[in-house]
Amino acid sequence: MANLVEATSPQQFEELLQKAGKSLVVVHFLAPWAPQCTQMNDVMAELAKENAQVTFVKLEAEAVPEVSEKYEISSVPTFLFFKNNQKVDRLDGAHAPELTKKVQRLSSAAVPMGTGVAAKEDLNERLKKLVNAAPCMLFMKGSPQEPRCGFSRQIVELFKQHSIQYSSFDILSDEEVRQGLKTFSNWPTYPQVYVNGELVGGLDIVKELAESGELENTCPKAITLENRLKSLINKNNVMLFMKGNKEMAKCGFSRQILEMLNSTGVEYDTFDILQDEEVRQGLKTFSNWPTYPQLYVKGELIGGHDIVKELKESGDLESVLKGEN
């Protein structure tokens, strides 16, 4: 397939981005020894068949370290999405449904829609869904992790200072939304903030709300990290915080602890700490336990790999998981 290629050098990688221009480029940072990367290569091949306008690039992370370091690739598989030679989105891990959604969403802007009343109605319906996608929606340039203009950066910082819970949409990734929302909301600039589907305004109005003490009353407050961690460790009677998940461990210790838990037949749930840096770092302090995996039973820390291994060898693991000890 002409739109499914491999990049083996920084120069080739840059040439592929420049050649694509405004079209979407999806780059899979992979390792040939990782089975989840092989699986996601198959997913990419299918997506390439269905999305001829999108360029899909396979790049071996360790073979092209200059590119991997530039984009802070710390695990595989990782997917980066580019338009106009700029990174517009990122996906860490082997999540085929999420990869498909991102490809569909980000490539839609490159496909011209029909003209006339029907097209406008379709766009308006899409915009209504977007502004109602979360109780508080921020339409900005870039992402909260990587704002791409000063105004967007300021509004993200204000939300952070006031513990506002929100979702965001990168208007640079979708020209149709970028232009359409200006008319839809009768507001010509970005960022734009919506609460319960209603426009609040831009940076100046958010600043005024913050200065008057009304921002917390206008926008929903985020749950504190401590409360979030408490909720997560009690999500199931047995919770394992690990690298990867039940189906696909991403480190040897996590893989071994899964095998030990599976051998007991006791039901448990997992949380992938690679998908949430806030939880990954916060739980270390919360539990006073510096490494992963971490096993909790009824909200209480049992320990890591070595302790679970000792419990397994002593014959106590099953009773501990059932809360009998």
Image: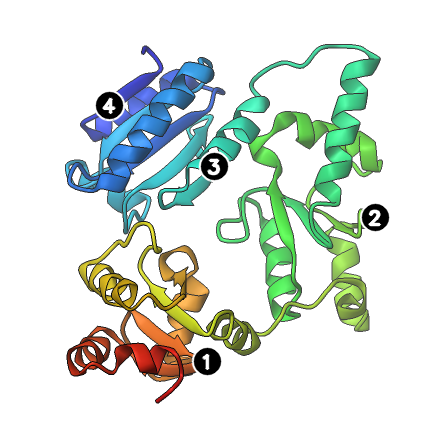
Q: Dot 4 corresponds to which residue?
A: 6
Mark 3 belongs to which amino acid? Pro
Mark 1 residue element: loop
Q: Is residue 88 visible?
A: no
Q: Nearer the viewer, residue 48 or 208?
A: 48
Name above or below for residue 143 compared with residue 7. below
Mark 1 belongs to which amino acid? Lys
Mark 4 belongs to which amino acid? Glu
The reply to whether dot 4 and dot 1 touch (C-beta < 8 Å) is no
Q: Which numbered tag is attached to residue 298?
A: 1
Q: CA distance from mark 3 to mark 1?
A: 31 Å
Q: CA distance from mark 4 to mark 1?
A: 47 Å
Q: Which numbered tag is attached to residue 97?
A: 3
Total count of labels? 4
Mark 4 residue element: strand
Q: Dot 2 corresponds to which residue?
A: 198
Q: CA distance from mark 2 to mark 3?
A: 30 Å
Name above or below for residue 211 compared with residue 252. below
Q: Is residue 292 visible?
A: yes
**Left of 42 or right of it: where is 90?**
right
> Which quarter of the image is occupied by the C terminus?
bottom left
Q: Earlier in the sequence, mark 2 or mark 3?
A: 3
Q: Position of residue 207 (x, y in %)?
A: 74, 61
Q: Earlier in the sequence, mark 2 or mark 4?
A: 4
Q: CA distance from mark 2 to mark 4?
A: 45 Å
Q: CA distance from mark 1 to mark 2?
A: 41 Å
